[in-house]
Image (cartoon, rainbow, N blue to C red):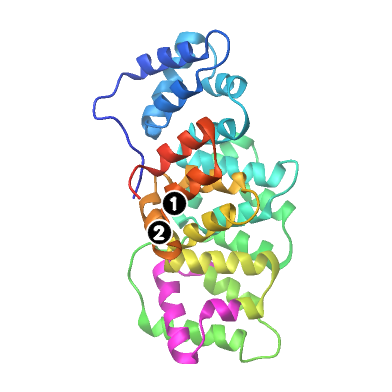
Amino acid sequence: MSTLSVPPFLTSPRQDAIDLYKAFKGFGCDSAAVVNILAHRDATQRALIQQEYKTMYSEELTSRLSSELSGNLKKAMLLWILDPAGRDATVLRQAFTGDAVDLQAATEVICSRTSSQIQTIKQIYHMRFGVQLEHDIHYHTSGDHQKLLLAYVGTLRHEGPEVDHNMVSKLAKDLYKAGEKRLGTDENTFIRIFSGCSWAHLAAVASSYDHTYGKKLEKAVKSETSGYFELALVTILRCAENPGKYFAKVLRKAMKGLGTNDVTLIRVVVTRCEIDMQYIKAEYHKKYKKPLRDAIHSETSGHYRTFLLALVGSSP
């Protein structure tokens, strides 16, 4: 459920483009005006504003935003201006080809998206960057982590709530035999099941595993695997069981301790705002006894803070 707040009576995309141009003119950018407009427009409206801006001023709005804004506000706004699938494709490309390869970010995005979302991301990735997503995965990852990511982006999974209970018991047994029951781990079985099951099916497998063998499947995964392979399996499992809770934990980790991981904070808030931020907020408050808004407010400042708070919405 989205937390994006759009005014009941919108100005036209043309007028928004004019107002943005005015905000850019003169000495210094009126960042507050830019945030006030773009933080309250949905993906379709933002696309229309960009079209109008280019038609009227013969330049890309993204180029002007890049030159007028700075710091974390710039990073967040340049991601936000894109459509949801375009954002994911951009985050992945930056994770693979940035100054430092960020396999944690790449793993999070790939393993927390539905099968249909991934197919759209793959199309946009190739269209915008001229390379297949699978190529970059293959080039920048290795071992079982690579095998799992390639299988995950290459498999079409069912997205409905239906579950085959006979198959659930068999898959739980397969995972037990591939891990805890034997000396060493049969990684290929974990890859096959985690990349092939729908989220509803995998959640049912996890419940069956816990009931049959008296141990959480996530704990079994953590004891049997390591590194980015473990991260990918755990991400898939947590998102199958409760994606809101998963992202609440990611946000908590980004803001906990000394300093804030703004890259992660921006990635999660911006990419989930139009999808399930309301559920993430509820899970965050439930687990950490503090509204997500309050946490973001205390860890950010200025127009960057205003922008993120606008995206997460006014409710606790």
Residue placed under numbered mark 1 in the picture: 292
Instruction: Please say if 292 is above or below 236.
Output: above
Percent across and percent down for residue 71 are: 62, 31
Q: Which mark is residue 10?
A: none
Instruction: Check disc 2 and report its element: helix, strand or loop.
Output: helix
Give neighbour class at mark 1: few <14, some 14-19, many 20+ (Cα, 10 Å). Answer: many
For the point 62% across and 65% down, the residue is 231
The three-letter amino acid code for the residue at tag 2 is His
Q: Which residues are magenta?
A: 195-221
Q: Main secondary structure of the magenta part?
A: helix
For the point 62% across and 48% down, the residue is 261
Mark before the other along the chain sequence, 1 or 2: 2
Give neighbour class at mark 2: few <14, some 14-19, many 20+ (Cα, 10 Å). Answer: some
Q: Which mark is residue 285?
A: 2
Q: From mark 1 to mark 2, how far is it between C-alphas?
A: 7 Å
The three-letter amino acid code for the residue at tag 1 is Leu
Percent across and percent down for residue 289 are: 42, 61
* Residue 290 left/right relative to 11: right
